[in-house]
Image (cartoon, helix red, strand yellow):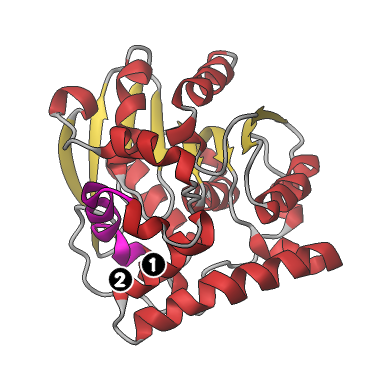
Amino acid sequence: MIVLLSAVFTSHVLAQSANPTEQQLGKLKRVRVNGVELHYSERGQGVPVIFVHGGLDDYRMWKAQVEPFAQHYRVIAYSRRYNYPNKNLHIRADHSALVEADDLAALIKKVNLERVHVVGHSYGAFAALFLAVKHPELVRTLVLAEPPVLRWAQEKQEGRALFDEFMGNMWRPAGEAFRRGEKEQALRLTVKYFAGEGVFEQVPEELRQYWASNLRDWQALTTSRDAFPELRREDVKSLKAPVLMLSGGRTLDIHKFVDAELRPLLQNGERVIIPDASHDMWNEQPEASRRAVRAFLASH
């Protein structure tokens, strides 16, 4: 998921406005794994750090982060299977973070990255969490920016209300619009939910095009029969890798709820709250997010 509040449009546009250059992100490469193609950029040398974007985004969202991290690490920023510029036409009916975790594991092995620092945002953080559970041997550390482990919300009364509101007011209507072939309407519903009435019409065309280039990902998720697969609390509690949680001080209530459920499970975890940020913290507060992650990686 992504939160697009009016106050962050400028930062989001600036972050994605121009096509990133090879100097900014590194040379764009492509591999084929699990029957799909994955594009990724690479810069720097040393211990690998792999960045995993969230919904309606792609590898370009990390443009402001690659160069600073590449000064000390081998940085990989990739696009998940249904995101720009990948050309994977077939959408799985059961697409989920489990599928994305398998793709990520295959990419790590294909590029011979061995054990990696994984930095995940939103749905990318959900995939990263599944990766750590299923393939702990591949994960050196884990940075999770609000993974939507939404099934946990259904286990408590307060969480169920938040879950039902989210699904009923945005997720299911967007999925129904995609099934009718109304892609722009699905995007409008999404932006309206996260940012408010009339905001879609106000954003620059460049940002709309950026979202449009990643609509297949949003379609795959909102029409999936299992977009939020079960993640057992026991499996999360058994994680040995150090984990940093990044939370936005102004994020949605459902993300606050999930983060509050996640934190006590992490035996080797810590949490940093970015005060003046929503769920879209990497675009709103790129320097604060970077500082927190670099300090965490330096200590591990």
In the image, is residue 208 part of the stretch drawn in magenta? yes
Q: Nearer the viewer, residue 194 or 199?
A: 199
- Per the image, the residue denoted by label 1 is 188
Image quadrant assignment for residue 112: top left
Q: Amino acid at mark 2?
A: Glu
- Residue visible at 64% across and 51% down in the picture: 252
Q: Amino acid at mark 1?
A: Arg
From this view, report whether residue 76 is shown above or below residue 106. above
Q: Residues within 10 Å of mark 1 (few under 14, many from 20)?
A: some
Residue 43 as seen in the image, left or right of residue 156: left
- CA distance separating discs 1 and 2: 6 Å
Q: Which residues are magenta?
A: 203-217
- How far from the left and from the top, in percent, is residue 113? 35, 33
Do the residues under discs 1 and 2 have CB atoms within 8 angstroms?
yes
Badge 2 element? helix
Kindly identify which numbered label has been placed on residue 184.
Answer: 2
- How far from the left and from the top, in percent, is residue 61? 33, 39
- Residue visible at 27% across and 19% down in the picture: 44
Q: Residues within 10 Å of mark 2 (few under 14, many from 20)?
A: some
Q: Using the rendered image of the protein, determine whether residue 153 is visible from the camera's viewpoint.
A: yes
Image quadrant assignment for residue 188: bottom left
